[in-house]
Amino acid sequence: MDDFGFAELKSTTEQCRCDFLRVNLELCNTYIELAQTHLNVGDRQAAHRIFERAEIGHATIGRFLADVQNVKRRREIERQLTTLVRRLQSLKASLS
């Protein structure tokens, strides 16, 4: 017996955690694109609200990333997170 299925549960949890982080990264990138669109049409207030949602998503990713055990998966998510941070910084500068 494999510890009453704990190994499988651990593996499934890791996969779900990684999927959750990837979806959040995609959502944050979508928020950034949407905020940029609002900024381009002159709706700074909407752009700022959407930017705040992207920042919340970024913080959420940061909280869960440390729990990713698979080094290859964690590095890939970290790489994508670095790109996200650059995009957030650029958008923040545009909103200032």
Image (spheres, grey):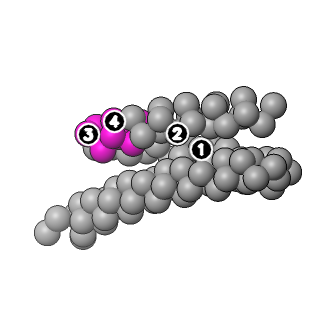
Camera-side residue of 75 and 32: 32
Inter-mark Cα distance, 2 to 4: 14 Å
Reply above or below: 26 against 80: below
Magenta stretch, overall SS: helix
Q: Which residue is mark 2?
A: 84
Name the kind of residue labelled 1 in the image: His
As helix, strand or loop, the secondary structure at mark 3 comes to helix
Residue depicted at x 24% and y 70%: 4
Q: Which residues are magenta?
A: 71-78
User: Which of the two labelled residues, at mark 4 and mark 1, occupies the earlier sequence position?
Assistant: 1
Q: Are marks 4 and 3 in contact (CB under 8 Å)?
A: yes
Residue 42 got which mark?
none
Please identify the quarter of the rendering in which residue 90 is found.
top right
Q: Which residue is mark 4?
A: 75
Q: Residue furthest front?
A: 41
Q: Which residue is mark 1?
A: 58
Residue 72 got which mark?
3
Q: Position of residue 2 (x, y in %)?
A: 17, 65
Q: Nearer the viewer, mark 2 or mark 1?
A: 2
User: Which of the two labelled residues, at mark 2 and mark 3, occupies the earlier sequence position?
Assistant: 3
Name the kind of residue labelled 2 in the image: Leu
User: Which of the two labelled residues, at mark 2 and mark 1, occupies the earlier sequence position?
Assistant: 1
As helix, strand or loop, the secondary structure at mark 1 comes to helix
How packed mark 3 is, by other alpha carbons closer than 10 Å (few <14, some 14-19, many 20 or more), is few
Q: Nearer the viewer, mark 3 or mark 1?
A: 1
Inter-mark Cα distance, 4 to 3: 5 Å
User: Which of the two labelled residues, at mark 2 and mark 4, occupies the earlier sequence position?
Assistant: 4
Q: Position of residue 18 (x, y in %)?
A: 38, 54
